[in-house]
Each structure stands twice: as C-alpha cells, then as structure tokens.
C-alpha cells in the first residue's frame, strides 16, 4: 500500500484545521532529516520530493511517498512515538 505523507503534518506552526496531524509539542521536535531517519529505522522504503500541501498551497513542503503495510493513521502514530 502506498501512503503519502506531507511534512506539513508535522508543522508546529499550523493548526489542525490546516493539516497538522500530530500534537504541537511533538511537532516542535520535527525535522525532515529526523523523519527520513525514522522511516528508514521502521524499514519502509520511501521517496521524497518537493511539492505543495493542498490546504497550504502558498508554502513549499516535502512529500514522502512511503510503501507501507499499515494504514496512514497507524504509520503517523509510529512516527509520533519516535519524534
């Protein structure tokens, strides 16, 4: 199953309405490099590219396309615990 993650999901400056998917205190520790390390440690192959998140089209972001055996919400909770 292919899961698409945007770095905006972890942006502490955004409200949940604009796309943040993790608590603000967890998002404060986020960096793109850290997310890549977490995905590697979980063993999921991924590719990253630059793009825009649909809810915040004026701000450039990273898009991560992850090959995962779990659904997106489960993957986000794994990442949240490791941040």
Image: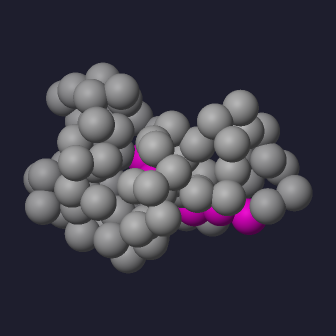
Magenta stretch containing residue 9, yes or no? no
Tell whether 32 sits left or right of 63: left
Tell whether 78 sits left or right of 51: left
**47, above or below 53, in the image:** below
Q: Residue at x 29, y 60 (%)?
A: 83
Pinpoint residue 46: horizontal percent, then vertical percent. 32, 54
Q: Residue at x 28, y 37 (%)?
A: 77
Pinpoint residue 68: horizontal percent, then vertical percent. 24, 36
> Which residue, as the protein is rendered here, is positioned at the far front?
25
Magenta residues? 60-65
For the residue pair 33 and 16, the one nearer the viewer reads as 16
For the residue pair 9 and 41, the one nearer the viewer reads as 9
> Which residue, as the protein is rendered here, is positioned at the far right?
58
**11, above or below 22, in the image:** below
Pinpoint residue 24: horizontal percent, then vertical percent. 51, 51
Tell whether 68 sits left or right of 17: left
Tell whether 17 sits left or right of 7: right
Magenta span dominant secondary structure = strand
The answer to whether residue 19 is seen in the rendering is no
Q: Residue at x 46, y 44 (%)?
A: 23
Number of callouts: 0
The answer to whether residue 24 is seen in the rendering is yes
- Colour style of the rendered protein structure: one colour
Pinpoint residue 44: horizontal percent, then vertical percent. 20, 49
**49, above or below 64, in the image:** below
- For the N terminus, give its image quadrant: top left
């Amino acid at each position: 199953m292919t899961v698409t993650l945007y770095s905006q999901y972890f942006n502490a400056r955004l409200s949940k309405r604009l796309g943040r998917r993790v608590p603000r205190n967890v998002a404060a520790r986020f960096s793109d490099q850290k997310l890549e390390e977490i995905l590697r440690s979980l063993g999921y192959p991924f590719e990253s590219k630059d793009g825009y998140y649909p809810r915040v089209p004026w701000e450039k972001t990273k898009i991560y396309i992850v090959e995962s055996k779990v659904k997106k919400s489960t993957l986000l909770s794994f990442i949240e615990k490791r941040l």
